[in-house]
Every structure is written in structure tokens, then in C-alpha cells.
DNA sequence: TGGACGTCGCATTAAG
DNA sequence: CTTAATGCGA
DNA sequence: GTCCA
């Protein structure tokens, strides 16, 4: 594959993008030799979907607007479509509300797979525009990779995600994203309406099929070289005859027809849109669509007023959080906590810790070296922190979190909140976890993910007759606790489980 | 070929 | 009202 | 849908 972008450092202004948009752009960038980075100051070029300088000034430091190259994201699509680094100048963000940049194809006029007309990226992005799927052009997929990486025997790929290295974006990323569409479809009961799967027989099958797709994608994620043939694919663990067939279609046509069809399904798109709300899963979203005839988020908010707050702030919550902002949020909370009770330490977990350039939410695990399992102060401190946020008008909503319950009895406390930083209005989802010091690093492992990685840690632990949970490691036989040294940090947890160390950035076993 | 597929706590809803 | 079942997220 | 007993 030609390295089109030549290690160019690229920053994307997250405004007007959804998390899946960012994921897609990020994959395309990386696969074509670009480097997505976390901070606009260090970028060679900055991509945006904002069409006017005025809008731009609200989203980016004004000094950067003049000192950096800021272009419309269509530049990237066109570079990839033409397999060349195109002149950026025609794509510069135009002065306000003058018409689109008039741009003639700098090179061959032939195939113009630039997927979207410029007008589709306009300034008004309402929930109904939400597209959970990316639209990838065939030309992009057909761009081939050299199989020059050190090749491995596919069947030797470890069967557990916790024993493999899974990068954030892999060489077969576009194939995986294609398969993932099918997984999502299965997870939502294919095309069954709610009533027909209330008899749980068919529904359960679909869920199991979805799981099978998850595992196949997870294995592919850790596979080091570009898949070039079906025979190569079908010896990879968790890829059987059916998925091999899909891969075959992808290899010969550059896409999977089923996936492309699903991307255009109005019903599936609505159902996935509803699921962007916390507390709405596959069951509820189908109820909203099929029974209450909801088609927009506003419909959903009317059907269930408790979701109204989230709908109000939907576009904020959907806007990906650039990496460099995440520690600022953690520092704010940590500073407030320090005033309530000094000596706390914390680790930012979740996708941030796994190295993602943009996050949907922020997960932070807190502890105090003096906080042990039996002390009841942690709950009080957490409540005080929440009260403090309320006083500062930083707290917008509590999505989940209670001071009662058995988790609380074990000294583990959590609050999932919606908040904003002082003097800012932007809403951010933050999961705050308080752990006793004895299980701090176990918690950090548990909250770092990814989902598949966690799932296979548990499976691996079971094989050793152990139980891995966020509140500690114990023996399956008698339930007795395994002590893990906190001084040795996270590696001690892996050691206790007999696992090779895997860097957090290599734990991206989900798509 | 048939059973397993991670696991648990919180929250909401259905049942008693 | 209390308790059981289910959905949901991590 | 795939693996394994």
C-alpha cells in the first residue's frame, strides 16, 4: 500500500463528529500512513467539519487557526480516493458563509469515489443525521497492503484476548468494521420485531451469533498481517466457515453486501441512535421503535421523560473528547477531592488508558493509601465530592450510583455522572470509582478494558480455579481472597493471574 | 452432536 | 408493601 | 457462529 499521508501528524476537531465518525477517520488515517495525534499544537494539519471561520473560532484556539493548516475533512477522503497527497489549499476553511470551495480534481477525473457531496457536511447536525456506521468507499478498501510484516502461523494466535496484543487500530481494521456491522445487527435481533422475540428462543441465538462475531473480530484485531486469502483467514481462531465466507466476499469485492445494506437500514439506524442514551439497550430501543413508534430522540424523550436530560445534551455527549482534555477533567476532580480529604491517588482508565486519541467518556479510579475495605469514610468522601460538584454547578445529572448495595459493603463505590468543567458548558460523562487500597490495581485492570479483554481474563482465571472480579481476586474453591501487592502496581495483578504483561495500549480487543 | 459462550451490581419493572 | 425477574452497563 | 467434550 502506498503510504499516502507520509506520517503526517493530523488532529481532528471533534465538533460535529460522532464517536463512530472519529473511529472511522482514525482508521483511515492510520492505515494510510497518517498519524492521528491528541493535540492541535503539534499537528501538521488540522481537519474539521466546520464550514466557516466563525464557527472554527469557537472550537479552536484562534492563534492556531492562523498558524496551522486547517482544512475540511473532505481533503482526507479525496487524498485516499486519489491515492495521493493532494494540495491542501483548495480545502482550506472558507471565510464565513461564502460558498463551498470550488475545487477541481487536481488529478485524474475518472472515478470520483469521494463519498459525500460537500453539502452533506453542513453546519446543522441534528440527531436525525446520526449515522452509527461509517460509509467506506470501495476504492478505499481496495487499496492493498504489502504483506511484509513478519508473518505468523494463524493457528498459533492465542485464543484468549488477554494473551494477545491488540492495537487500537489494526492492519485489517476495515474488514473488522465491516464484520462488526453484522455483529451489531445480530445483537439487536436481526430484523425481528419486539413481539416476535419476546419468546426468547430466536433472540438468544442472535445474541450468541453476535458473540461469535465479537470473538472473530477480536482475533483479527491481534492478527499482525493483512489477510490476503480465505484459506489464510479460516485457520485463525474463531473464524469458521460462515465468517470465512463473508471474508471471502470482502476480499473479492471490497465490501460485504449485507453490511452495506444494513448501513442503510432506517430501523437499525434509529435503534442504534436510541442506544446512545445511557440506560437504553437493544430491548428498550426496539420497544421505542416498534411499539411507541419513536423515530427521533425527541420522540424517545417524550415516551420516557427520565431520558430528557440526556436528549437535551445529546450532541455534547456525542462529541468525542480529545485526549489532551481528559487529564484536565481528572485534575479538576482530584483537586476538589484533595480539599475534601488530602492524599488521594487516581488512575484514568477506560479508552483513554488504552491510548485512544478520542474518548466518549472518562473513567477514573480513586483510592487513598489509608483507605481499607472496612473503612466507611470512602462513601462519605465520594458523597462530599458529588455535593461539591453540585455547589460548583458542575454537576448536571447522576446517571447511576447509589450509596447502598453490596458493592458498597465491600468498600467499592461508584457514581456515573454528567458534568461540565467550571466556566464551560460542554457536558461530559464521567465514571468515578472509589476503591479500597487493597484492590486498587485490580480495579484499574477491571476498568481499563476492553470488554473482550476483560471477558477473557475471567475465562483465564477460571481455568486456574480463580475468580477475577472488580472487587478482588479469589479462589473458586473456597472463595478465599488472593492478596495482590499494591506496591508493585498493575503488573502484580497480571502476575497473580499467571498472565504475561500486556500494555494498556495493547488491550484494544474490541473493534 | 449438544451445550457453553463472563460476571455482577444497580435500577426498573413485574409479580406476589 | 416486599420480593423476583429482567435490562443494562462495566 | 464457533469451539469443545
Image (cartoon, coloured by chain):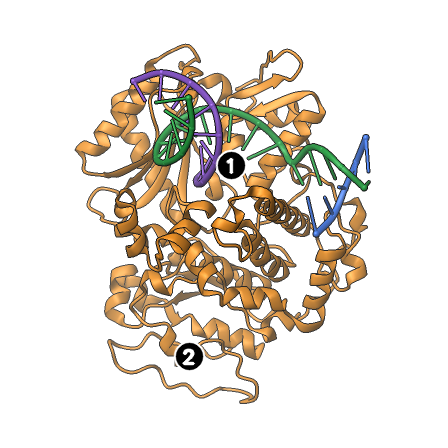
Chain colours: A orange, B green, C purple, D blue
Judge left or right: residue A306 versus residue A168. Answer: left
The numbered dot on residue A178 is none
Where in the figure is residue A342, as x and y percent of width and height?
Answer: 31, 20
Q: On the same chain: label 2 and label 1?
A: yes
Q: Secondary structure at mark 2?
A: loop
User: As rendered, which of A139 and A239 lies closer to the eye?
Assistant: A239
User: As rendered, which of A4 and A438 lies closer to the eye?
Assistant: A438
The numbered dot on residue A117 is 2
Mark 2 or mark 1, whichever is nearer to me: 2
Where in the figure is residue A269, as x and y percent of width and height?
Answer: 45, 60
Taking the spot 52% from the left edge, 75% from the top edge, the residue there is A79
Q: Is residue A439 visible?
A: yes
Taking the spot 56% from the left edge, 22% from the top edge, the residue there is A488
- CA gap between label 2 and label 1 equals 39 Å
Location of mark 1 (residue): A448
Q: Quadrant of residue A51?
A: bottom left
Disc on the earlier residue, 2 or 1: 2
Q: Secondary structure at mark 1?
A: helix
Judge left or right: residue A63 versus residue A224. Answer: left
For the residue carrying disc 1, how many other residues have a C-alpha within 10 Å: few (<14), some (14-19), or many (20+)? many
| Chain letter, disc 1 residue | A
Q: Quadrant of residue A418?
A: top left
Q: Is residue A321 visible?
A: no
Q: How many callouts does the rendering have? A: 2
Judge left or right: residue A347 versus residue A215. Answer: left
User: Vertically, is A85 above or below A466?
Assistant: below
Say if mark 2 contacts mark 1, CB within 8 Å: no
Taking the spot 42% from the left edge, 37% from the top edge, the residue there is A363
Q: Quadrant of residue A279?
A: top left
Where in the figure is residue A414, as x and y percent of width and height?
Answer: 38, 28
For the residue carrying disc 2, how many other residues have a C-alpha within 10 Å: few (<14), some (14-19), or many (20+)? few
| Chain letter, disc 2 residue | A
Amino acid at each position: 500500500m502506498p503510504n499516502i499521508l507520509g506520517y503526517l501528524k493530523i488532529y481532528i476537531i471533534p465538533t460535529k463528529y460522532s464517536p463512530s465518525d472519529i473511529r472511522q477517520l482514525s482508521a483511515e488515517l492510520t492505515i494510510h500512513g497518517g498519524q492521528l495525534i491528541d493535540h492541535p499544537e503539534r499537528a501538521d494539519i488540522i481537519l474539521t467539519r466546520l464550514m466557516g471561520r466563525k464557527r472554527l473560532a469557537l472550537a479552536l484556539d484562534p492563534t492556531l487557526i492562523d498558524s496551522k493548516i486547517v482544512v475540511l475533512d473532505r481533503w482526507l477522503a479525496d487524498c485516499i480516493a486519489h491515492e495521493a497527497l493532494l494540495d491542501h489549499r483548495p480545502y482550506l476553511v472558507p471565510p464565513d458563509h461564502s460558498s463551498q470551495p470550488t475545487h477541481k480534481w487536481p488529478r485524474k477525473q475518472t472515478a470520483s469515489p469521494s463519498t459525500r457531496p460537500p453539502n452533506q457536511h453542513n453546519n446543522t447536525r441534528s440527531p436525525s443525521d446520526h449515522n452509527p456506521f461509517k460509509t467506506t468507499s470501495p476504492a478505499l478498501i481496495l487499496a492493498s497492503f504489502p504483506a511484509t510484516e513478519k508473518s505468523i502461523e494463524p493457528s498459533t494466535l492465542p485464543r484468549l484476548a488477554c494473551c494477545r496484543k491488540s492495537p487500537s487500530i489494526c492492519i485489517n481494521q476495515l474488514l473488522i468494521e465491516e464484520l462488526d456491522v453484522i455483529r451489531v445487527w445480530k445483537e439487536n435481533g436481526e430484523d425481528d420485531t419486539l413481539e416476535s422475540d419476546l419468546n426468547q428462543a430466536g433472540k438468544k441465538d442472535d445474541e450468541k451469533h453476535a458473540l461469535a462475531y465479537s470473538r472473530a473480530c477480536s482475533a483479527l484485531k491481534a492478527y499482525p498481517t493483512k489477510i490476503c486469502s480465505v484459506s489464510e483467514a479460516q485457520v485463525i481462531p474463531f473464524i469458521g466457515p460462515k465468517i470465512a465466507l463473508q471474508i471471502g466476499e470482502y476480499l473479492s469485492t471490497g465490501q460485504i453486501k449485507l453490511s452495506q445494506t444494513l448501513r442503510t437500514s432506517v430501523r437499525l439506524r434509529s435503534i442504534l441512535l436510541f442506544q446512545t442514551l445511557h440506560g437504553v439497550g437493544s430491548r428498550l430501543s426496539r420497544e421505542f421503535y416498534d411499539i411507541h413508534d419513536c423515530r427521533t430522540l425527541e420522540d424517545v424523550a417524550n415516551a420516557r421523560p427520565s431520558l430528557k436530560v440526556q436528549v437535551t445534551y445529546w450532541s455534547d455527549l456525542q462529541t468525542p473528547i480529545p485526549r489532551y482534555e481528559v487529564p484536565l477533567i481528572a485534575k479538576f476532580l482530584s483537586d476538589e477531592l484533595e480539599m475534601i480529604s488530602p492524599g488521594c491517588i487516581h488512575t484514568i482508565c477506560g479508552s483513554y488508558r488504552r491510548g485512544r486519541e478520542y474518548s466518549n467518556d472518562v473513567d477514573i479510579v480513586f483510592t487513598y493509601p489509608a483507605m481499607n475495605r472496612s473503612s466507611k469514610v470512602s462513601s462519605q468522601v465520594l458523597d462530599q465530592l458529588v455535593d461539591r460538584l453540585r455547589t460548583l454547578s458542575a454537576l448536571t445529572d447522576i446517571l447511576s450510583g447509589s450509596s447502598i448495595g453490596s458493592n458498597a459493603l465491600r468498600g467499592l463505590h461508584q457514581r456515573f455522572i454528567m458534568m461540565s468543567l467550571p466556566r464551560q458548558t460542554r457536558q461530559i460523562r464521567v465514571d468515578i470509582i472509589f476503591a479500597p487500597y487493597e484492590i486498587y490495581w485490580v480495579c484499574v485492570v477491571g476498568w481499563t478494558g476492553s470488554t473482550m479483554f476483560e471477558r477473557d481474563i475471567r475465562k483465564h482465571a477460571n481455568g486456574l480455579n480463580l475468580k477475577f472480579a472488580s472487587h478482588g481476586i479469589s479462589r473458586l474453591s473456597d472463595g478465599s481472597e488472593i492478596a495482590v501487592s499494591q506496591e508493585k502496581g498493575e503488573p502484580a495483578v497480571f502476575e497473580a493471574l499467571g498472565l504475561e504483561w500486556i500494555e494498556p495500549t495493547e488491550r484494544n480487543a474490541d473493534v
